[in-house]
Image (tube, rainbow, N blue to C red):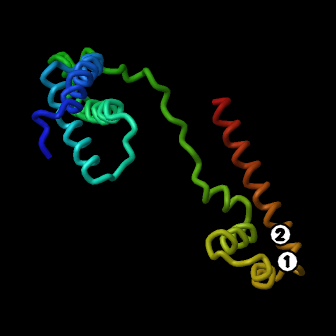
């Protein structure tokens, strides 16, 4: 593919390079970076056009779109990180800035406080993945409905313990 005397290619170059340069400049890049990005975008454009991989409506818009993506990637990678001076202790956060985190009570303690039967029922349902019918039979409930109601009561008992625990922590 020869490009040296192609008037369409020359017009794309003449019209698109300044737009790419302005875009790169707004993103903090220089003219050499803009030229590199433009050339990379043109190469990608020519490869896609040669492969007929995409339906290109506007050559200039397609090149600008590629250049935008390339410049975002390149300028993000080239960003300089500023280091703190040797006085890092000066910038430290004071030890008393944060309140100490509340010590949460483990969930197992709530389960144990709910009772042995609740612990067995919830373990069978959530851990062993048994159906409510199997749980009713295994834990000797009269019906599946009774086991379901008991599971609900156990969960409510645990929720109340958690609420009470959080309320007590908040008042401390």
| Residue 80 visible within the image | no
Q: Splitting the image into 4 quarters, where does residue 110 fall?
A: bottom right
**Residue sitting at x 27%, y 32%:** 67
Q: Quadrant of the C terminus?
A: top right
Estimate the x, y position of residue 59 in percent, counting from the top left: 32, 34
Estimate the x, y position of residue 11 in percent, counting from the top left: 23, 25
Q: Splitting the image into 4 quarters, where does residue 71 fall?
A: top left
Q: Is residue 28 above or below residue 99?
A: above
Tell me, for residue 85, which label it has, or none.
none
Estimate the x, y position of residue 149 in percent, counting from the top left: 86, 66
Q: Is residue 108 above or below residue 37?
A: below
Left or right of 18? Residue 62 is right
**Residue sitting at x 28%, y 47%:** 49
Residue placed most toward the observer, 2 or 17: 2
Estimate the x, y position of residue 47 in percent, counting from the top left: 23, 48
Check disc 2 and report the residue beneath it.
Answer: 148
Q: Is residue 34 above or below residue 116?
A: above
Residue placed most toward the observer, 54 or 33: 54
Secondary structure of the residue carrying tag 2 is helix
Are the residues flagged by discs 1 and 2 in contact, CB closer than 8 Å?
yes
* Label 1: how many Cα within 10 Å (few below 14, some 14–19, many 20+): some
Tell me, for residue 144, which label it has, or none.
1
Residue placed most toward the observer, 4 or 45: 4
Q: How many marks?
A: 2
Separation of residues labelled 1 and 2 (CA atoms): 6 Å
Secondary structure of the residue carrying tag 1 is helix
| Residue 55 visible within the image | yes
* Label 2: how many Cα within 10 Å (few below 14, some 14–19, many 20+): some
Q: Is residue 141 above or below residue 67?
A: below
């Amino acid at each position: 593919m020869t490009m040296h005397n192609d008037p369409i290619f020359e017009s794309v170059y003449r019209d698109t390079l300044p737009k790419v340069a302005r875009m790169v400049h707004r993103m903090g890049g220089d003219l050499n970076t803009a030229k590199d990005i433009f050339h990379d975008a043109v190469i990608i454009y020519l490869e896609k056009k040669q492969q007929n991989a995409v339906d290109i409506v506007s050559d200039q818009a397609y090149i600008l779109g590629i250049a935008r993506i390339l410049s975002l990637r390149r300028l993000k990678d080239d960003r300089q990180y500023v280091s703190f001076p040797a006085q890092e202790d000066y910038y430290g956060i004071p030890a008393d800035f944060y309140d100490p985190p509340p010590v949460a009570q483990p969930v197992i303690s709530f389960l144990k406080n709910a009772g042995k039967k609740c612990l067995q029922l919830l373990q069978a349902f959530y851990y062993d993945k048994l159906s409510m019918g199997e749980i009713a039979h295994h834990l000797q409930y009269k019906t599946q409905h009774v086991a379901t109601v008991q599971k609900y009561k156990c969960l409510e008992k645990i929720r109340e313990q958690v609420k009470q625990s959080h309320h007590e922590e908040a008042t401390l």
